[in-house]
Image (cartoon, grey):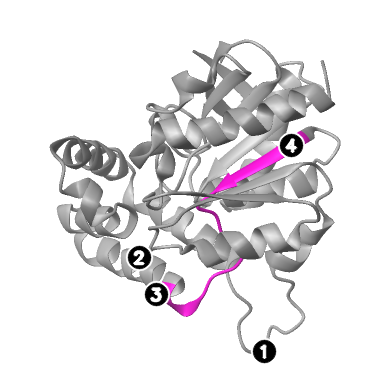
Amino acid sequence: MAQANVNGTQIWHELNGAGTPLFLLPGLGLDHRYYRLGEPLLRDVCTTVLVDPRGIGQSQKDDPSDVTYSAELWADDFAALARELGYAKIDVLGSSLGGSMAQALTLRHPDLVRSLIVIGAFSELDRAMEMNFSLRKKIIAKLGMSEELADFMGLSTMTREFMETDEGLAIMQANQANIQSNSPELYTAFLDAILNWGRRQPGQEGETLYTELVAGITCPTLVIAGDNDYFIPASFSKKIAEAIPGAAYAEVHDGGHIPFIEKPAETAALVKNFLTEINAAFPA
């Protein structure tokens, strides 16, 4: 565990395993513990690089009045961290909002990224997703980082089948506590980052959707979706896979929005198979 002073901030990170580094970028408002169930399963094929994004966990919490949080800002932070650690090439895995960070990192630093993996990700928003994130902002404005917000987050991201198990309920409650550790100001800034990433609005026809931008990604790419993700359905992952030339696509059976939490073994197996192929094609 260490702190690195990079890109005008301080980023917490932890390295495990051996081989080409795999940066693990967590979802909205959650820290490196997002990968607590799946990361140990990956260590035999790579060096896992767990990170807390700027503003989250043990990384520096820059005031939103001083910086504008965005997928691009987080991407530049991680690129700077990789170079600070002396890495010439990295693999990048991002889930949910971490998938947005991973897409931005690959587009902005193509010389650095050897391969890209996105899970439960999106390259644009629809009205339902936009309403979900906007509703979270309204809840925070009225109630703060409340139990109500945590429940709404849990219902949005976990399948009812998973929550029905005692283990699933305990894991969801741990994630809820993680979410509630954010300050209202920072979590609102993270929501704004998603909404600004999101969908072309009327009168903004000149704006380019990330679905169009990711067509420029040329590195090997794996796109994974849970087939039971009703928050960000698999169709959004398919859009990314169809847009990126040569991208592979896979679904986790009975997986929800965060398959690395609900189905860690199955998800890790998909990632390991992909990385094993990359390692064979691009030996260190």
Spot occupied by residue 11 in the image (x, y as percentages of width and height)? 56, 27
Q: For mark 1, does the 10 Å Cα neighbourhood hold few (<14), some (14 to 19), or many (20 or more) residues?
A: few
- Give the residue pinned by disc 1: 203
- In this view, the mark in front (4 or 1): 4
**Residue in the image at 45% along x and 59% along y:** 191
Residue type at the position of mark 4:
Ser
- Give the residue pinned by disc 4: 115
- Mark toward the start of the polypeptide (4 vs 3): 4
Q: What is the spatial separation of the Cα atoms under label 3 and label 1, in whole angstroms?
A: 19 Å
Image quadrant containing the C terminus = top right
Decide: marks 3, 1 in contact (CB < 8 A)? Answer: no
- Residue 60 seen by the camera: no
Answer with the quarter of the image where residue 90 lies. top right
Q: What is the spatial separation of the Cα atoms under label 4 and label 3, in whole angstroms?
A: 32 Å
**Residue in the image at 47% along x and 21% along y:** 41
Of residue 102 and residue 73, the one placed in the foreground of this image is 102
- In this view, the mark in front (2 or 3): 3
- Give the residue pinned by disc 3: 131
Secondary element at tag 4:
strand
Residue type at the position of mark 3:
Met
- Mark toward the start of the polypeptide (2 vs 3): 3
Of residue 89 and residue 188, the one placed in the foreground of this image is 89
Spot occupied by residue 158 in the image (x, y as percentages of width and height)? 30, 52
Residue 7 in the image: above or below residue 218:
above
- In this view, the mark in front (3 or 1): 3
Secondary element at tag 1:
loop
Q: What is the spatial separation of the Cα atoms under label 2 and label 3, in whole angstroms?
A: 10 Å
- Mark toward the start of the polypeptide (4 vs 1): 4
Q: For mark 3, does the 10 Å Cα neighbourhood hold few (<14), some (14 to 19), or many (20 or more) residues?
A: few
Q: Confirm whether the magenta stretch covers residue 38.
A: no
